[in-house]
Image (tube, grey):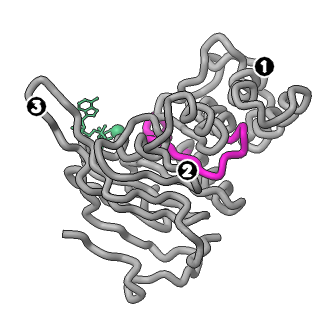
Amino acid sequence: MVNTDARPLIDLRNVVKTYETGAGGVTVLKDINLKVRPGEFLSIVGPSGSGKSTLLNMITGIDRPTDGEVYVGDQAVHKMSENQLARWRGRNVGVIFQFFQLLPTLTILENTMLPMDFCNVYKRRERKDRAMRLLEQVHIAEHAHKLPSALSGGEQQRAAIARAMANDPPVIVADEPTGNLDTVTADGVFALFEQLVSEGKTIMVVTHDQSLSERMERVLHLLDGRIDRDQNNGHNGRQMSVESGYEHRLA
Ligand SMILES: Nc1ncnc2c1ncn2[C@@H]1O[C@H](COP(=O)(O)OP(=O)(O)OP(=O)(O)O)[C@@H](O)[C@H]1O
Ligand SMILES: [Mg+2]
């Protein structure tokens, strides 16, 4: 449940990202201000090149802002070193990509255990059981001992979600997680996200799929590096509405 009184879990303040190219600097995020509360399920939409992936990368610390501040929980993400970031991300942010990015020579079970081995949150002897439980949760436990190549796209994406959940992170970010899946399979992946949100996770998903983004509580429209519209769809009888000023258009 979204706690409207809660402090934001994700807080971007005046975030600017400029890439230096041969032809000079290109600013792809322009003064982004964004607050996401614990328990929100938010999608990011916008044309190709509008800055969606770059925005997610600011939150995961995969990339750094040129200016501005990024807070996730109590962490000032923009200030952390690469080493600190890797450790922090492993515990606090589950990242899911369009192309699954499972390691091809490890089984599904081993892939799922990998973040646990990296972060040492769970005791060594607990890890296999926990990984199996996660695979059960995403309904692919029977594939645990197969290599990724033996699974369908939807099954591989479910494995990637299980892996993202390995250390029980409060935040999950996904960049086009259904971009390579058929409609029915994409639907299943979204249902899984909805379940995780109902269990208290905070999820941000970049998607091109309008029918999926319409199911989201909150949709952030990016246009040319700016938040063009912050839309609340008011699902689940939530109190937030246009009248309450939750939705606003930015210049
Ligand atoms: N490392 C980089 N160096 C220079 N420019 C970059 C770099 N990474 C991204 N860009 C540019 O930044 C802009 C935003 O890219 P980004 O990947 O965030 O877009 P996107 O909204 O995710 O697009 P898509 O829907 O195609 O994935 C694009 O114009 C892209 O070319
Ligand atoms: Mg992208």
Q: Please tell me which residue is depicted at 65% across the width and 70% down the height of the picture.
A: 1
Would you identify the image quadrant in which residue 25 lies? top left
Q: Please tell me which residue is depicted at 68% across the width and 41% down the height of the picture.
A: 165
Q: Image height check: is 75 above or below 249?
A: above
Q: Please tell me which residue is depicted at 61% across the width and 39% down the height of the picture.
A: 88
Q: What kind of element bears circle 1?
A: loop
Counting residues from the start of the chain, the first of labels 1 and 3 encountered is 3
Q: Main secondary structure of the magenta part?
A: loop
> Within 10 angstroms of label 1, few (less than 14), some, or many (20 or more) residues?
few
Question: Does 182 appear in magenta?
Answer: yes
Q: Quadrant of ligand 1?
A: top left
Q: Identify the residue position indicated by label 1 in the image.
A: 145
Q: Identify the residue position indicated by label 2 in the image.
A: 75
Instruction: Name the side, left or right, on which 4 lies relative to 132.
Output: left
The nearer-to-camera label among 1 and 2 is: 2
Residue 67 at x, y percent in the picture: 29, 47
Residue 20 at x, y percent in the picture: 19, 30
Circles 3 and 2 in contact, beta carbons < 8 Å:
no
Q: Identify the residue position indicated by label 3 in the image.
A: 24
For the view shown, which residue lies furthest in the right direction?
Answer: 125
For the view shown, which residue lies furthest in the bottom direction?
Answer: 243
Type of amino acid at the residue the image marks with label 3: Gly
- Closer to the camera in the image, 237 or 169: 169
Residue 125 at x, y percent in the picture: 91, 27
Q: Is mark 2 within 8 Å of ligand 1?
A: no
